[in-house]
Amino acid sequence: MIEIKGLTKRFGKKSVVEDVSVEIVPGTITSFIGPNGAGKSTLLSMVSRLLDSDTGDVLLDQTNVKKWKSNEFAKRVSILKQSNFLNVRLTIRELVAFGRYPYSKGRLTAEDENFVDQALGYMNLIDMQDQFLDELSGGQKQRAFIAMVIAQDTDYVLLDEPLNNLDMKHSVQIMKILRKLVNELGKTVVIVLHDINFASVYSDRIVALKDGKLVRNGPTNEVINSVALREIYDLDIPVQEQNGCRICVYFNSHTKATEIS
């Protein structure tokens, strides 16, 4: 289990994350939602050790993440940042193979190659695996980076806005794959999302932040309702039930819908 205890991060005099405590339930998709500037990405960066907190702790299996050796931590927790820049020319397969580095140290075994093949298959990239990253669209690159994270084969997969640059088809594909990783492989996924409908349909639990503070935390149905969403976004958002899913109708304030409060 990942336990977040009293995390605070300030940049100058501004508190970007303020005294946030959350437990990440194993075997679930947990989505971080909230307005721009709510502290979602900063919180995820502290959980993944990309950023130090000013106060508070993150525990992985009851041990502070700062005490984990980097290589062992990389076998348990993988992170996909919001922006990924490489100054070397790589093929898709070469990039995905980097996900095996904690195990292979650059010398891929047959087992490593198998994990790379599986990740490419998950992301429907096998036919493109020899293409160079600089030849790809933004969405194709994003899928390649997600495949790299999948190949890392960690218990915990942390994704910061992975749907950036993706069209609707591929956004749905990514979320279905993440759901499959949880349901079939027992992974624990933590994801920063802007689209609350993707969070609603695919998440087990939701952590809602606003102005750096924890506003709501719980099962999806406890957060995706008009009362909670008004508190999070300062916006009246009708919620409709469709095929067992709660859909937020936020694009038209005059839409008539049955609100779930």
Image (cartoon, rainbow, N blue to C red):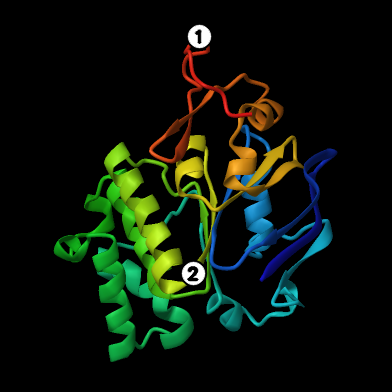
Q: Nearer the viewer, mark 1 or mark 2?
A: 1
Q: Nearer the viewer, residue 129 or 29?
A: 29
* Residue 256 visible: yes
Would you identify the image quadrant in which residue 39 lies?
top right
Query: Whole-Å distance between the Cαs marked 1 and 2?
Result: 40 Å
Q: Nearer the viewer, residue 89 or 109?
A: 109
At a point 32% along the width and 88% down the height, the residue shown is 111
Q: Label 2 sits on what residue type? A: Lys
Relative vertical location of residue 129 with respect to residue 213 in this rendering, above or below: below
Report the side of 228 relative to 200 (left or right).
Answer: right
* Residue furthest to the top: 254
Q: Quadrant of the N terminus?
A: bottom right
Relative vertical location of residue 23 with respect to residue 201 in this rendering, above or below: below
Name the N-terminal-most of marks 1 and 2: 2
The percent coordinates of residue 51 (x first, y second) are 68, 58
Q: Label 1 sits on what residue type? A: His
* Residue 87 visible: no
At a point 50% along the width and 9% down the height, the residue shown is 254
Q: Residues within 10 Å of mark 1 (few under 14, many from 20)?
A: few
Q: Which residue is mark 2?
A: 187
Q: Quadrant of the C terminus?
A: top right
Q: Which residue is mark 1?
A: 254
Report the side of 157 relative to 113 (left or right).
Answer: right
Would you identify the image quadrant in which residue 94 lies?
bottom left
The percent coordinates of residue 203 (x first, y second) are 51, 50
The percent coordinates of residue 208 (x first, y second) are 66, 42
